[in-house]
Image (tube, rainbow, N blue to C red):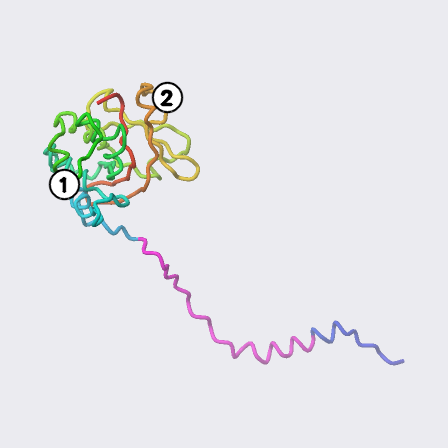
């Protein structure tokens, strides 16, 4: 009787012979080293907050405000005599960076400190800040410096939780509240407690996050925040 060879068994026999003949010739694969295309370093960690604020300034040739530039914030800090608050060695601080838009809109910083949001043709940021009430201006800037180093994570570890911090303004008037959502966006003073309604009516979402300096961290705002009217 003729023996019938199972086709499947024959396949495995042939495959095994071929594998044994070639496997010993395979070289070891070189170790893979991952090189990310994105630069994960902090590009401004050799600067103080004050150096960064002066560095990140630009007005277009037509005088239109551009992006996140800080021309008005530079002028405001100089007018208030608060350069040392942004150039010190305290690494625990968080600087809420007020871009040009935060000064020029209705109800924004220029109106708060001068009584009018109007900027005359040809007026520079220094010219505008020369009209400011200095004590009010200092309070605005002091409220935008938090005495804790606040990152999206791990500082705001849980999303939807209200985290309470203190600004340079002492006591209850200087309390500020931050929380992040599940998309890692940070809202400021959106919580109904412990803040008065006058604060939560002007809550603001952080525009850009985590600018690391050698004396703290910065987040950009498109409008100012407050605890109570300045």
What are the residue bounds of the magenta stretch? 13-40
User: Residue 16 magenta-drawn?
Assistant: yes
Which of 177/228 is in front? 228
Counting residues from the start of the chain, the first of labels 1 and 2 encountered is 1
Number of dots carrying numbers: 2
Quarter of the image with the C terminus is top left
Which of 99/94 is in front? 99
Q: Is residue 64 left or right of residue 197?
A: left
Quarter of the image with the N terminus is bottom right
**Residue at image coords 65%, 75%:** 16
**Residue at image coords 16%, 29%:** 137
Q: In this view, does 40 lie to the left or right of 24?
A: left
Residue 218, given in percent of the width and then of the height, sits at: 25, 40
The Cα–Cα distance between marks 1 and 2, rounded to whole angstroms, is 33 Å
Which of 103/78 is in front? 103
Image quarter for residue 8?
Answer: bottom right
Q: In this view, does 191 lie to the left or right of 212?
A: right
Residue 99, given in percent of the width and then of the height, sits at: 25, 39
Residue 223, given in percent of the width and then of the height, sits at: 29, 33
**Residue at image coords 36%, 35%:** 186
Residue 70, given in percent of the width and then of the height, sits at: 21, 42
- At numbered mark 1, what does the secondary structure look like: helix, strand or loop? helix
Residue 18 visible to the viewer: yes
The residue at which mark 1 appears reads as 87
The residue at which mark 2 appears reads as 192
User: Residue 101 magenta-drawn?
Assistant: no
Image quarter for residue 119?
Answer: top left
Mark 2 surroundings: few (<14), some (14-19) or many (≥20) residues within 10 A: some
**Residue at image coords 31%, 23%:** 199
- The answer to whether residue 201 is above or below residue 20 is above
């Amino acid at each position: 009787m003729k023996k019938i060879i199972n086709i499947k068994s024959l396949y495995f026999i042939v495959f095994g012979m071929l594998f044994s003949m070639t496997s010993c010739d395979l070289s070891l694969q070189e170790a893979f080293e991952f090189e990310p295309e994105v630069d994960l370093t902090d590009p401004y960690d050799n600067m103080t907050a004050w150096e960064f604020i002066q560095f990140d300034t630009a007005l277009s040739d037509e005088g239109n405000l551009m992006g996140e530039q800080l021309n008005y914030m530079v002028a405001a800090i100089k007018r208030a005599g608060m350069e040392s608050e942004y150039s010190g060695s305290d690494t625990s601080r968080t600087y809420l960076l007020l871009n040009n838009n935060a000064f020029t809109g209705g109800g924004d910083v220029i109106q708060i400190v001068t009584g009018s949001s109007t900027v005359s043709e040809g007026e520079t940021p220094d010219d505008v800040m020369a009209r400011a009430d200095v004590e009010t201006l200092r309070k605005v800037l002091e409220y935008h410096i938090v005495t804790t180093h606040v990152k999206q994570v791990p500082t705001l570890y849980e999303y939807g939780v209200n985290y309470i911090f203190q600004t340079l303004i002492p006591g209850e008037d200087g309390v500020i509240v931050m929380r992040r959502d599940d998309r890692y966006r940070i809202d400021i003073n959106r919580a109904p407690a412990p803040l008065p309604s006058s604060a939560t009516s002007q809550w603001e979402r952080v525009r850009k996050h985590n600018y690391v300096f050698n004396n703290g961290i910065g987040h950009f705002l498109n409008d100012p925040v407050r605890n109570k009217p300045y």
